[in-house]
């Protein structure tokens, strides 16, 4: 390994088609859950952009569920839309052949970013009016106003997306045999219900959050302060009780009332009988400590979590989605609304990589992992930008020894220049080896060097052919352990 230095790097369509793309994705997209045989889906809606809930510092990225609906479906328009297949099925980073679409479908496709806050597909129109759809890092389903459905699935990089999501968010789900076809809204509600039940189970095991709540009541003894106006309005001329206001430290607070309100909604929406029964049991548990109160989505969005209740983070995100009743009621009313439901696989994969590194580091003596850690900037002055690699491996003493960045891409053999430049910046800032981490398959590429520090490409086994979730986790973490054996052990030798 070269000696440390003070070196710093200063980082510095003509085809006749019109395109609408994913220019606003990183700005607007949040995620939700949607189960099918291999899919969980999400889309953003401008109506819900204000519902951002900050995650804890340990979270790699914000993961706030929201959904979006389009105009009414008019199947008579389907005669003008002639898809290459029905449904249209794409993997990541694939595109359709050009095909004719109706005017309403064309307007829907071009207006996705304005309508939903993001465009999960690239849409190109040729001079003949035919459209070409191109997928990127988003998987899910899109139903056009003509009724034509577009499905994007992680065909090459993930064995089962539900397993990937479970691992990424460490959701202790034990009822995930419930996987349905991607043909109805019921699977969407069941997906939300499964994850909600699992997260609530985790919260209950850690204890319900208590908070101070302002309470007004009639008491036999003075408690808090007397409300003079209410006391004078008491009907009895000689009062033997007191109208008081006081602060009560209780589980019957807005946060828990929102959770209870959400589970009561979910019970009416899920289609699986076993899941509904499990949710009813949890509802009864909550009602022992929490009262049933109407809770508005705007109220939930104002809830701020702290280190004392950050175990509610994912549960609160799900509650926010569930309480957006208009979305649920519209979609449950029938299949008469066009819709878009997608999940950003970049977000999921970043969390998979961070959790995999953490799991393996725990087995290694004297190593720890930071996710999205802030590192020294290479550029001073107004042009400086935030530098936060997905994974930073340190010694027990805090010395960085490896930096890694997760890239959800299927073409491992040709890393983009921007990916290489980004990791190079991290390497030079920290003066440690770096790794580009990809999903699935294997990477057959010799390491490069940056000022004497190695730059590797590596793949984790998100596509492992296994028969159970536990086997899937073992295979995935074994691939990360292989990376540690090759890179981390060598990098950490000077500090051992």
Image (spheres, helix red, strand yellow):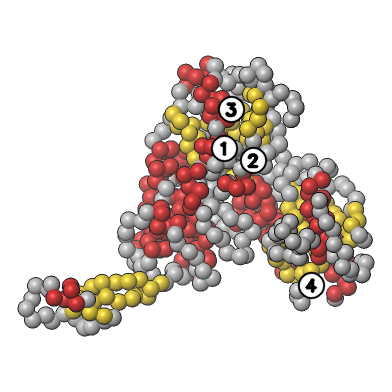
Percent coordinates x, y for residue 218 in the rendering: 20, 75
Percent coordinates x, y for residue 378 in the rendering: 79, 61
Percent coordinates x, y for residue 396 in the rendering: 75, 75
Q: Residue furthest bottom?
A: 221
Q: CA distance from mark 1 to mark 4?
A: 43 Å
Pointer 3 residue? 87
Q: Earlier in the sequence, mark 2 or mark 3?
A: 2
Identify the image quadrant of the C terminus. bottom right
Q: Is residue 482 above or below residue 39?
A: below
Q: CA distance from mark 2 to mark 3?
A: 26 Å
Q: Is residue 248 above or below residue 414?
A: below
Callout 1 environment at 10 Å: few (<14), some (14 to 19), or many (20+)?
many
Q: Nearer the viewer, mark 1 or mark 4?
A: 1
Q: CA distance from mark 3 to mark 4?
A: 52 Å
Q: Secondary structure at mark 4?
A: loop
Q: Nearer the viewer, mark 2 or mark 4?
A: 2
| Image quadrant assignment for residue 210 | bottom left
Callout 4 environment at 10 Å: few (<14), some (14 to 19), or many (20+)?
some
Q: Secondary structure at mark 2?
A: loop
Q: How many marks?
A: 4
Q: CA distance from mark 2 to mark 1?
A: 8 Å
Q: Is residue 177 visible?
A: no
Q: Secondary structure at mark 1?
A: helix
Percent coordinates x, y for residue 87 in the rendering: 58, 27
Callout 2 environment at 10 Å: few (<14), some (14 to 19), or many (20+)?
few
Q: Earlier in the sequence, mark 2 or mark 4?
A: 2
Q: Nearer the viewer, mark 3 or mark 4?
A: 4
Q: Nearer the viewer, mark 2 or mark 3?
A: 2
């Amino acid at each position: 390994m070269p000696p440390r230095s003070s070196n710093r790097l200063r980082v510095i369509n003509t085809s006749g088609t019109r395109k609408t793309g994913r220019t606003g994705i990183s700005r607007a997209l949040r995620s939700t859950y949607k189960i099918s045989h291999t899919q969980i889906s999400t889309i953003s809606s401008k109506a819900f952009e204000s519902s951002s809930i900050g995650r804890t510092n340990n979270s790699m990225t914000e993961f706030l569920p929201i959904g979006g609906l389009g105009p009414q479906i008019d199947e008579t328009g389907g005669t003008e839309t002639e898809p290459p297949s029905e449904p249209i099925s794409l993997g990541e980073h694939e595109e359709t052949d050009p095909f004719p679409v109706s005017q309403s479908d064309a307007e829907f496709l071009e207006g996705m970013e304005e309508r939903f806050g993001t465009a999960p597909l690239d849409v190109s129109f040729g001079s003949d009016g035919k459209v070409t759809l191109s997928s990127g890092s988003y998987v899910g389903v899109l139903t056009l106003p003509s009724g034509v459905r577009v499905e994007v699935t992680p065909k090459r990089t993930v064995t089962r997306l539900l397993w990937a999501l479970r691992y990424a968010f460490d959701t202790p789900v034990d009822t995930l045999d419930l996987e349905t076809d991607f043909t109805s809204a019921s699977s969407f509600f069941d997906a939300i219900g499964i994850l909600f039940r699992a997260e609530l189970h985790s919260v209950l095991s850690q204890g319900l959050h208590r908070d101070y709540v302002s309470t007004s009541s009639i008491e036999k003894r003075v408690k808090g302060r007397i409300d003079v106006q209410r006391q004078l309005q008491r009907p009895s001329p000689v009062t033997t009780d007191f109208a008081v206001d006081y602060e009560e430290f209780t589980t019957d607070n807005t946060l828990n009332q929102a959770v209870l309100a959400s589970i009561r909604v979910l019970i009416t929406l899920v289609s699986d009988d076993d899941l509904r029964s499990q949710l009813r049991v949890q509802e009864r548990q909550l009602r022992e400590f929490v009262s049933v109160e109407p809770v508005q989505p705007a109220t939930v969005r104002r809830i701020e979590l702290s280190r004392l209740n950050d175990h509610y983070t994912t549960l609160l995100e799900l509650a926010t989605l569930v309480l957006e009743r208009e979305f649920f009621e519209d979609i449950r009313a029938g299949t008469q609304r066009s819709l878009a439901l997608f999940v950003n696989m970049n977000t999921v994969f970043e969390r998979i990589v961070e959790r995999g590194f953490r799991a393996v580091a725990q087995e290694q003596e004297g190593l720890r992992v930071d996710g999205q850690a802030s590192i020294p900037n290479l550029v001073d002055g107004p042009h400086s930008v935030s530098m936060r690699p997905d994974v930073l491996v340190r010694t027990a003493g805090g010395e960085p020894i490896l930096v890694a960045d997760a890239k959800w891409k299927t073409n491992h053999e040709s890393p983009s220049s921007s990916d290489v430049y980004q990791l190079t910046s991290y390497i030079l800032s920290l003066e440690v080896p770096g790794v580009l981490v990809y999903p699935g398959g294997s990477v057959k590429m010799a390491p490069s060097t940056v000022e004497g520090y190695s730059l590797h490409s590596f793949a984790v086994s998100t596509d492992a052919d296994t028969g159970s979730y536990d086997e899937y986790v073992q295979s995935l973490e074994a691939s990360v352990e292989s990376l540690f054996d090759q890179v981390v052990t060598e990098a950490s030798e000077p500090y051992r």
